[in-house]
Amino acid sequence: MLLYVKSELCAVEHKPTSKFPEQVWCRITSSRNSEALVGVLYRTPTSDIYGGGNHDALIELLEEVNGTGKQFVLMGGL
């Protein structure tokens, strides 16, 4: 996974504890000191690659990110 962020946004890597395999995140702080998380992920449409628990790992990831209380943007596909 790859996430490009304009250098002027001063992004800092963010690593969720979720075991979801294909993800990358950063934390961006605004000029008003509010933080937002930006993430990119890939969810395979089949269970052949990561097994049947991939869907549960995605739900766990979303709950974790939502639980931070920060706004977030998640991009990706299947």
Image (spheres, rainbow, N blue to C red):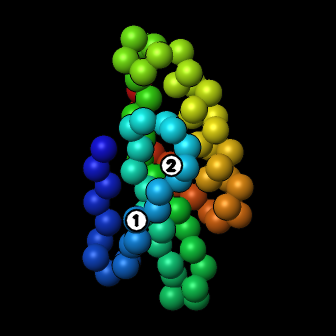
Quadrant where the image shows the C terminus: top left
**Looking at the image, is 7 positioned above or below residue 44?**
below
**Looking at the image, is 5 positioned above or below residue 21?**
below
Residue labelled with disc 2:
74
Q: Looking at the picture, how far across and down is residue 58, in whole percent?
A: 57, 34
Observer-nearest of 60 and 72: 60
Q: Are marks 1 and 2 in contact (CB under 8 Å)?
A: no
- At a point 46% along the width and 62% down the height, the residue shown is 14
Q: Looking at the picture, how far across and down is residue 40, in whole percent?
A: 41, 47
**Distance between the alpha carbons at the discs numbered 1 and 2:** 15 Å
**Looking at the image, is 72 positioned above or below residue 59?**
below
Left or right, 45 with reference to 3: right
Mark linked to residue 62: none
- At a point 71% along the width and 55% down the height, the residue shown is 67
Q: What type is the residue that disc 1 sits on?
A: Glu
Q: Looking at the picture, how far across and down is residue 7, in whole percent?
A: 28, 76
Number of numbered callouts drawn: 2
Give the farthest residue toward the bottom: 32
Q: Looking at the picture, how far across and down is residue 72, in whole percent?
A: 57, 58
Q: Secondary structure at mark 1?
A: strand
Mark linked to residue 13: 1
Left or right, 66 with reference to 31: right
